[in-house]
Amino acid sequence: MSINQYKRYLLKECDNIDEFWKELCPERPLGNKRGRFIYRGQRDDTWPLVPSILRINKKINHKIHIKCEEQVHNELMILNYFVDQCDSIGISIINDSLEFRKRYLDFKVGDGNDKSFIDPSNWPSEELLELMALAQHCGVPTSLIDWSKRSYIAAYFAASSALKHYEENNDKKLAVWALDIEKIKLYKNIKLIKVPGSTSNNLAAQSGLFTFLKQPGKMGDIFSPKFLENEFENTPDTPLWKITLPVKYSVEILKLCKLYGISGATLFPNYNGVSRSVFDYINTILIK
């Protein structure tokens, strides 16, 4: 039986900064005029939409192939270590209680994560999502993908990262992905995760939210992850767009972002954000 393959995403290739900036303008449909798009910026338009935990799998696994339940174990192990380090310096975590830790952070048989080890497609428990969101915004790898409600914030992240890696990236294109959150309600394997802005200052500053893609596989199966965009190849009317621009325009993007009050300092409102702004400035000078 043949399966129809549809476009995973719609592509808009921009040739200049004016076209790119206009396409993402909040007053235009793709720029969120109707409030139904979320955005993600990446410095390389050839990269798929992959959560950070899958990008580091080769580093933490010595085996070429791991089983699905081992992947769940690895993710829970990293989340546990994040909580341990928060405890060590007296920082609170989301939804904390003895019962929460016993049910959802323990590895022991009989606890809340049992279902995820027996059937890895149940990972993660709904109760862990807010904690995962906090960890993600602190730079810890999880199976969530970061997005923003604001298109120009995504453009900043794409341009800032492209400038940081300009020597290896200068002949490529950067990308801003736009995802229609009304249409993804039709896809049962995709979850849109919104957590309170009080979860993280960075999260609030970036108008951040997350997607989670349920991965297939049973206990004993080799873990073979899917990418988000592949979820749309068997249905018409994809909810996903990719807007690209040559990396050489990254400096112009950062300048425009600054005019709109978007910088490393405003998106990371702490000393680390100030430092990020300084390095953006240095990279801008070096590219001139």
Image (tube, rainbow, N blue to C red):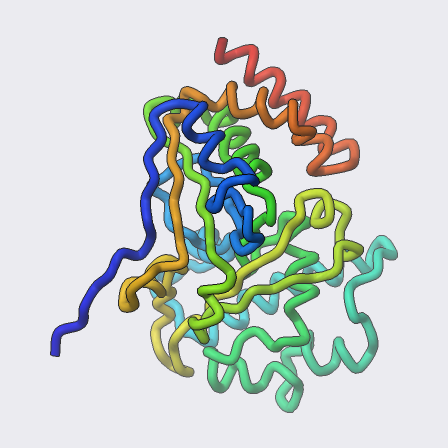
User: Which residue is at the far top?
Assistant: 288
Q: Position of residue 134 (x, y in %)?
A: 70, 57
Residue at 74%, 62% (x, y): give it. Answer: 83
Q: Which quadrant would residue 255 be assigned to in this image?
A: top right
Q: Position of residue 135 (x, y in %)?
A: 67, 56
User: Which residue is at the far bottom?
Assistant: 110
Looking at the image, which is closer to me, 164 or 81? 164
Q: Position of residue 197 (x, y in %)?
A: 75, 54
Looking at the image, which is closer to me, 27 or 200? 27
Left or right? Give the position of 87 relative to 235. Answer: right
Residue at 54%, 47% (x, y): give it. Answer: 32
Q: Tell me, yes or no, if residue 37 can be seen here.
A: yes
Q: Name the image quarter holding the N terminus.
A: bottom left
Residue at 66%, 71% (x, y): give it. Answer: 128
Q: Position of residue 37 (x, y in %)?
A: 52, 52
Q: Which quadrant would residue 235 be assigned to in this image?
A: bottom left
Identify whether 147 is placed above or below 23.
Answer: below
Identify whether 46 is placed above or below 17.
Answer: below
Q: Tell me, yes or no, if residue 168 can be seen here.
A: no
Left or right? Give the position of 192 relative to 200. Answer: left
User: Which residue is at the far right?
Assistant: 90
How many numbered discs, if any? Answer: 0
Left or right? Give the position of 95 relative to 15. Answer: right
Left or right? Give the position of 17 relative to 100. Answer: left
